[in-house]
Amino acid sequence: MIATLDDAIFAASVEPLLLLSILRYGLEGRHIVLTDPSYQRNGDRAVNQWLAARDPLVRDFAEEALDRSLRAYQSTASLAELRVADRKQSHWEGSNSVRYL
């Protein structure tokens, strides 16, 4: 499964442990965890600012999870996707294989 995290959730008041638990799936190779726009290690997006505010050990873990996911995405055949965004309530739309949260 591909989970895409909207960059805005890294600027929202989302519990850091929730984001780290999602990123853990990318590190373990259980899911592909991407950001929109696409994560760049030296970028200036909300995800980069969020990472900069983390402890170095946590930051390394999260960066590795995102890097691994970007590499895995290049060769995936997965059709199942979900999008995580800062919304007041869930919003489901799309085809049977794509869901937006």
Image (cartoon, rainbow, N blue to C red):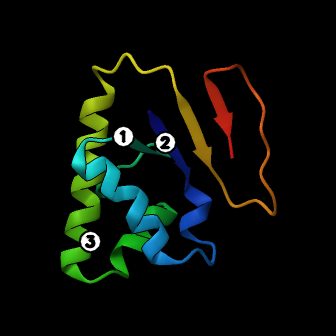
Q: What is the x, y in percent for residue 55?
A: 26, 83
Tell me the tag on residue 43: none
Q: Is residue 3 above or below residue 12?
A: above
Residue at the spot x=55%, y=56% of the render? 7
Tell me the tag on residue 59: 3
Q: What is the x, y in percent for residue 10?
A: 53, 67
Task: Give the CA separation, mark 1 to mark 3.
Answer: 19 Å
Determine whether the residue tagged by mark 3 lies in a helix, strand or loop. Answer: helix
Q: What is the x, y in percent for residue 42?
A: 30, 58
Q: Residue 32 falls in which quadrant of the image?
A: top left
Task: Give the CA separation, mark 2 to mark 1.
Answer: 7 Å
Amino acid type assigned to the residue bearing label 1 in the image:
His
Q: Residue 74 falls in which quadrant of the image?
A: top left
Q: Residues within 10 Å of mark 2 (few under 14, many from 20)?
A: many
Determine whether the residue tagged by mark 1 lies in a helix, strand or loop. Answer: loop
Amino acid type assigned to the residue bearing label 3 in the image:
Arg
Residue at the spot x=67%, y=20% of the render? 96
The residue wearing badge 2 is: 3
The residue wearing badge 1 is: 31
First in sequence: mark 2 or mark 3? 2
Q: Classify residue 21 as left or right of residue 3.
A: left
